Image (spheres, grey):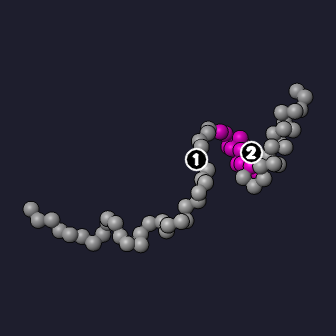
Amino acid sequence: METKKTTWGGRREGAGRPVGTKKAITRKTRSIAAFDDEWEMIRQFSKIVKKDKDTAKKILDGYYNEEK
């Protein structure tokens, strides 16, 4: 049985991610289950956390320091 050499697939020069483009610190991917309305709140809060951690901490401190 003969094997044909093809030109597709395998390693190629110049293929793949350029060296040095990967960030040194990356966020881990997490997974949670939430209803649509809960997810919207989680999504909004995650934007705050990523943009300004101090503000996110103040929000949480305010929540946990409230009298219940």
For the C terminus, which image quadrant?
top right
Q: Relative to residue 42, is residue 16 depicted above or below?
A: below
Q: Residue furthest top?
A: 68
Q: Left or right of 31: which side holds 42?
A: right
| Crowd tier of the residue under label 1, counting other residues whose Cα lies within 10 Å: few below 14, some 14–19, many 20 or above | few
For the N terminus, which image quadrant?
bottom left
Asked if the stretch drawn in magenta spans residue 60, the answer is: no
Q: Left or right of 59: which side holds 8?
A: left
User: Which callout, 1 or 2, points at the residue further toward the start of the chain?
Assistant: 1
Look at label 1 and name its amino acid. Thr
Residue 36 visible in the current orientation: yes
In the picture of the structure, the residue carrying the numbered disc 1 is: 29
Q: Relative to residue 32, is residue 54 depicted above or below?
A: below
Q: Position of residue 59 (x, y in %)?
A: 83, 43
Q: Nearer the viewer, residue 60 or 35?
A: 60
The structure residue drawn at horizontal position 87% and vertical position 33%, both measured from the top left corner, is 65
In the picture of the structure, the residue carrying the numbered disc 2 is: 41
Q: Relative to residue 65, is residue 20 depicted above or below?
A: below
Asked which quadrant contains residue 3, the reply is bottom left
Image disc number at residue 42: none
The structure residue drawn at horizontal position 58% and vertical position 47%, both measured from the top left corner, is 29
Q: Which residues are magenta?
A: 34-49
Q: Left or right of 3: which side holds 17?
A: right
Q: Relative to residue 40, is residue 51 depicted above or below?
A: below
Q: Residue furthest left?
A: 1
The structure residue drawn at horizontal position 59% and vertical position 57%, both measured from the top left corner, is 24
Alpha carbons under labels 1 and 2: distance apart:
18 Å
Look at label 2 and name its amino acid. Met
Residue 40 visible in the current orientation: no
